[in-house]
């Protein structure tokens, strides 16, 4: 259990440092990327490009290992179906991202960095998660 917790903390810290170094904890960067007809900021495209390149290079070799370091096996999605629930969730996520300039990872990193926007966004995000879970139970 300690190894799993240490791995989770190390992964989260690495992710947070990467977000902070790339400026992705600043919602204005994200909103600048989405403002293609105004004050466009291409920074996010480079961050996304780095993530895609890393995945393209390492995804298959990592899967060939047979299992992750701290688990018995990989848990990959079993369904690739595109349905109304997926499209609705993606749409709501995109609307929230476009309005706030935050998605969950950068919001939590921004919260850790003391961002005033994240102080408002994270509680609202938690309320949204709780509401979705309550609706899913019905």
Image (cartoon, rainbow, N blue to C red):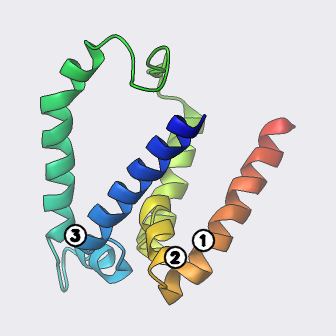
Q: Residues within 10 Å of mark 3 (few under 14, many from 20)?
A: some
In the image, residue 8 above or below residue 101: above
In whole angstroms, how far apart are the C-alphas of marks 2 and 1?
A: 8 Å
Label whose residue precedes the other's in the sequence (3 or 1): 3
Marking on residue 38: none
Which residue is located at x 39 percent, y 25 percent? 69
Tell which tag, 3 or 1, sits nearer the viewer.
3
**Residue 66, how many percent across, how many down?**
34, 10
Label whose residue precedes the other's in the sequence (2 or 3): 3
Viewed as shown, does residue 132 lie left or right of 105?
A: right
Label whose residue precedes the other's in the sequence (2 or 1): 2
Q: Residues within 10 Å of mark 2 (few under 14, many from 20)?
A: some
Marking on residue 22: 3
Picture mark count: 3
Q: Residue furthest right?
A: 138
Marking on residue 111: 2
Marking on residue 122: 1
Viewed as shown, does residue 48 lie left or right of 7?
A: left
Q: Assess whether mark 1 and mark 2 are in contact (beta carbons under 8 angstroms).
A: yes
4 or 136, which lies in front?
Answer: 4
| Kind of element beneath mark 2 | helix
In the image, residue 59 above or below residue 35: above
Image quadrant in which you'd find residue 129: bottom right
72 or 108, which lies in front?
Answer: 72
Which residue is located at x 31 percent, y 65 percent? 17
Viewed as shown, does residue 40 lie left or right of 67?
A: left
132 or 55, which lies in front?
Answer: 55
In the image, residue 92 above or below residue 87: below
In whole angstroms, how far apart are the C-alphas of marks 2 and 3?
A: 16 Å
């Amino acid at each position: 259990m300690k190894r799993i917790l240490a791995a989770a903390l190390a992964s989260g810290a690495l992710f947070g440092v990467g977000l902070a170094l790339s400026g992705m904890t600043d919602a204005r960067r994200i909103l600048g990327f989405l403002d293609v007809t105004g004050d466009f900021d291409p920074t996010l495209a480079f961050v996304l490009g780095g993530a895609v390149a890393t995945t393209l290079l390492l995804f298959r070799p990592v899967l060939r290992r047979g299992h992750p370091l701290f688990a018995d096996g990989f848990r990959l999605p079993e369904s690739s179906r595109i349905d109304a629930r997926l499209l609705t969730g993606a749409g709501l996520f995109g609307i929230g991202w476009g309005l706030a300039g935050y998605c969950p990872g950068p919001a939590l990193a921004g919260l850790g960095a003391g961002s005033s926007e994240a102080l408002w966004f994270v509680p609202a995000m938690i309320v949204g998660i709780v509401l979705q879970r309550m609706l899913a139970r019905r």
